[in-house]
Image: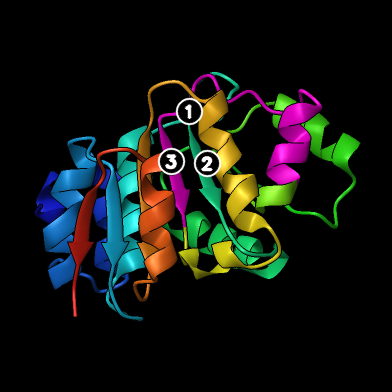
Amino acid sequence: MSFKKLIEPLKDTLNHKGFTNPLPLQKLILSKIKAGTSLFVIAPINSGKTSSMLISVVQKLKYAYEDAPRALIFVKDKQSALDLELEFNVFKRGTNLRVYCAYDEQNIDHQRDEIYMGTDIVIATPKRLNKLFYLNGINLNKLQICIIEDAEFLFRNNNLAEVTRTPESIGKCQYLVFTDKFDARFERWQDTFMFNAEVVEMD
């Protein structure tokens, strides 16, 4: 997919950052993501996984709409959530998309109130997301895309079970999983989380 097909604010941001042409991984997956394909992406560090995710989410959502989130991104911890929020704030420039971070160290009642006020993109740790959901603190009925960034963290601290529960609460949705390296445990988990996903592997 060419950057020329992106919305204008996103093209302006990429030009400002000096990104004139897609990276090989972006060429491989951006059009698939735009078409709504669920993907399991295995590619090395610095290959463009995070930028592909940022571009795809902003391009898919385009602008703020209603109150319930339309994109959910699982990350391993508070720092990862805050780092990704900073990157989203750059890539969503020129749009009115709203991003919210939900992690364990925050007051959950305060989080629930802020999410209720309206957000488009939620970046969350698995345990906090599930706690919010079971307290009716987040509405996943409008979710269009569910993403796991750096999925190696799933095999620590019961994160796999927490994330696997989420699709049980979601209707039709696109799933994206990004990881640096393949782990045999992904095979046993893949069908329970994102049935019929296409695997994309880059050396």
Rounded to the nearest angstrom, the CA distance separating label 3 from label 1 is: 18 Å
Q: What residue type is labelled 2?
A: Leu
Residue 113: image location, x then y, percent: 82, 29
Camera sees residue 120: no
Rounded to the nearest angstrom, the CA distance separating label 1 from label 2 is: 7 Å
Q: Give the range drawn in magenta.
A: 128-148
Dot 2 or dot 3: first in sequence order is 2
Q: Which amino acid does label 1 sit on?
A: Leu
Do the residues bearing badges 3 and 1 touch, measured as CB atoms within 8 Å? Answer: no
Q: Is mark 3 on a helix, strand or loop?
A: helix
- Quadrant in which the C terminus is drawn: bottom left
Q: Is mark 2 on a helix, strand or loop?
A: strand
Q: Is residue 178 above or below residue 142?
A: below
Tell me the residue that label 1 is attached to.
143
Indicate left or right for 93 with 181 as reference.
Answer: right
Dot 3 or dot 1: first in sequence order is 1
Tell me the residue that label 2 is attached to.
72
Indicate left or right for 27 with 181 as reference.
Answer: left
